[in-house]
Amino acid sequence: MKLRWTMAAILAAQASTAFAADNVIRIGVLNDQSGVFADNGGRGSVVAAKLAADDFGNELLGKKIEIISADHQNKPDIASATARKWFDNEGVDMIADGAASSAGFAILEVAKQKNKIFVISGPGSSDFTGKSCSPVSFHFNYDTYALSKLTSDAITRAGGKTWYFVTADYAFGHALQRDATKFIEAAGGKVIGSAAHPLGTADFASFLLQAQGSKADVVGLATSGADVQTAIKQAGEFGIVEGGQKLAGLLVFITDVNSLGLKVTQGLQVTTSFYWDLNEQTRAWSKRYAAQMDGKVASMVQAGVYSGVHHYLSAVKAAGTTDATAVAAKMHELKVNDMYNKDVAIRPDGRVLHTMYLVQVKKPEESKYKFDYYRVVSSKPGEEVFRPMSEGGCPLVK
C-alpha cells in the first residue's frame, strides 16, 4: 500500500513536470453543462473564457492559452475529483466558474490544497469571501449578501413587510435566505415562514400553496436556474400575484427572463452585476459573444467568467509567470478593467467590488428590440453593496 501511494505520487509529479514544460497556459471551466444551471453558465461560460483568451491573441509569455471544460453535474464529489485530476495530471493552471455553491466549495478545497487559482462566478454564497476565503480564490460576480441588500431591502421598504421563502435546500439557498432575512428585518419587515425544495424540483405546488396560505405580502424565491423558472411559471398558475401577493426572485438571470418571456416576468425586480445593454462596450462585447452563442446574450455568470479569466491573464502578463502565488498577488494589486468593469478593486478577502444594478423587467410593450428586457432602477458601487470585511469572518482579514 505504501509503495502504491509512493508510485502514484511519483507519477503525478512527473505529469505535473511534463505539463509545466509544454508551453501552455491551461484554464479549466468547471460548471454545470447539463442541469439546472446550464443556461446561465454551461457552454456560455466556456465561450466567455475563450473570448478573454482571444483578447490576448490566445498566447501569453510565449505560451499558448488553452481553454478546457467539464460538467460536474452539480455534484461536489465530481467537482472535487475533476479539479484534482486537472491540477495533478492535466496541467491546468486555474479553474473558473463553479456553478452551484456546494460544488464550488469542493473545487475551492482542492485549489487551496494544490495552491491553484479559482475564479468564482456561478456560486453565490457570501461565505466564499467569509469563513471560506482563501489566498487563491476570487469572487467575480454577485453573492447572496449583495443580492439581498438591493432586492429584499427595496421590496420591503416599498411595502412588502411580511415574507415567506421558497428556498433551495443547499448552501446557496440557505445563505441567500439568511442574508435576505437580515435586510428584511433591518427595513422593518419579518419572515413568517419558509419551505425548502431539493435541487431540480419539477413540482413546486406544495411549496407555493404553503406560501399562498401564509398570506405573506411577499413570496421570496431563494433559488435559481431552471428551478426559479419552474417556480415562477407555477406561481402564475396558482394566481399568487393576482391574489395580491408580490413575487420576488432574489436571483433571476436574463437567461431566465428570456426563457419565461416578458409576459410572465414583467415587473420583477432583479439584482445583477451585468446587463448586455448598459453601454457601447457591453454591447460590442455582447455582439462577439452572440456570434458564438446562436444569437444569445450573456448572463452575469458568463460575463463574470470572462472578467475573471481576463483579469487572471492580465495578472499573468504583469507578473511574468504562471506561479499561482505571484499571480494571486498581482490579481489583488491590479484593478479590474474590462468591458464592464472600470478600475474595480479586489479586497484582501477575494471580493471583487463590482457595481451592482437593481433592474426591473419591462412589460412586453415596452421592449423595443431583441433582449431589451431591463430598465435600470438604481445602481450602487461595490463598496456600498457587498458585505464589509469586518463582518465576514475571513481569516485573512486582520
Image: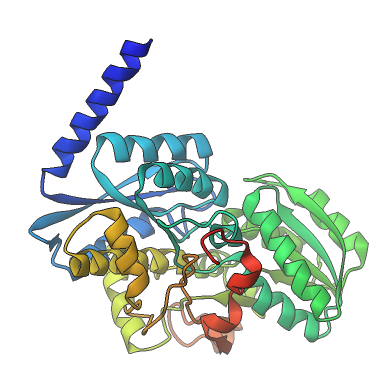
In terms of depth relative to the viewer, which is nearer, 337 or 260? Answer: 337
Q: Is residue 8 left or right of residue 211?
A: left
For this orientation, the residue located farthest to the front is: 398
Q: In this picture, is 324 found above or below 18? A: below
Quadrant where the N terminus lies?
Answer: top left
Evaluate whether residue 34 shows in this view: no
Q: Is residue 297 left or right of residue 145?
A: left
Q: In this picture, is 363 found above or below 302? A: below
Q: In this picture, is 182 found above or below 41? A: below
Q: Where is residue 201 in the image (x, y as percent from the top left)?
A: 67, 46
Q: Position of residue 351 (x, y in %)?
A: 49, 68
Q: In this view, does 109 lie to the left or right of 149?
A: left
Q: Position of residue 172 (x, y in %)?
A: 62, 55
In the image, what residue occupies the spot 54% across and 62% down?
129
Q: In this picture, is 14 found above or below 209? A: above
In the image, what residue occupies the spot 49% across and 58% down?
122
Q: Is residue 93 left or right of residue 117?
A: left
Which of the 4 image quarters holds residue 287?
bottom left
Please name the colour scheme applied to the rendered image. rainbow
Q: Where is residue 110 in the image (x, y as percent from the top left)?
A: 43, 42
Evaluate whether residue 117 shows in this view: yes
In the image, what residue occupies the spot 33% across and 65% down?
329
